Image: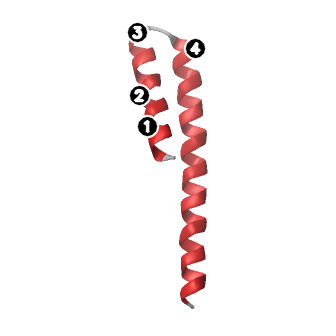
Amino acid sequence: MIRWTITFLIIALIAALLGFGGIAAGAASIAKIIFFIFIVLFVLSLLAGLVRRT
């Protein structure tokens, strides 16, 4: 999932450098959403691992 975030971030940076503001903003917002989903799933995974150990 983090690969998708990095991919959309790179697309956003390239689009911004080339002057495509709308595409850059869209790709950046998609990257941000996927990154937050990744963080939530990562924290839930850590909590599940802690619950299993106890």
CA–CA distance between discs 2 and 3? 12 Å
Residue density around tag 4, few if under 14, some if 14–19, many if 20 or more, within 10 Å: few
Please, what is the three-letter code of the amino acid marked with disc 2? Answer: Ile
Please, what is the three-letter code of the amino acid marked with disc 3? Answer: Leu
Residue 11, given in percent of the width and then of the height, sits at 45, 24
Badge 3 is on which residue?
18
Q: Which mark is first along the chain, 1 or 3?
A: 1
Badge 2 is on which residue?
10
Q: What element carries label 1?
A: helix
CA–CA distance between discs 3 and 1? 18 Å
CA–CA distance between discs 4 and 2? 15 Å
Q: Which residue is drawn at 58% across and 14% down?
A: 22
Q: Do the residues labelled 1 and 4 touch (CB within 8 Å)?
A: no
Residue 12, given in percent of the width and then of the height, sits at 47, 23
In this image, 25 relative to 9: left or right? right
Q: Residue at x 49, y 30 (%)?
A: 8
CA–CA distance between discs 1 and 4? 18 Å
Query: Which of the 4 image quarters holds residue 26?
Result: top right
CA–CA distance between discs 4 and 3? 11 Å
In this image, 22 relative to 10: left or right? right
Q: In this view, does 34 lie above or below 42?
A: above
Residue density around tag 2, few if under 14, some if 14–19, many if 20 or more, within 10 Å: some
- Label drawn at residue 6: 1
Q: In this view, does 53 lie above or below 13?
A: below
- Label drawn at residue 22: 4
In this image, 13 relative to 35: left or right? left
Query: Which of the 4 image quarters holds residue 51?
Result: bottom right
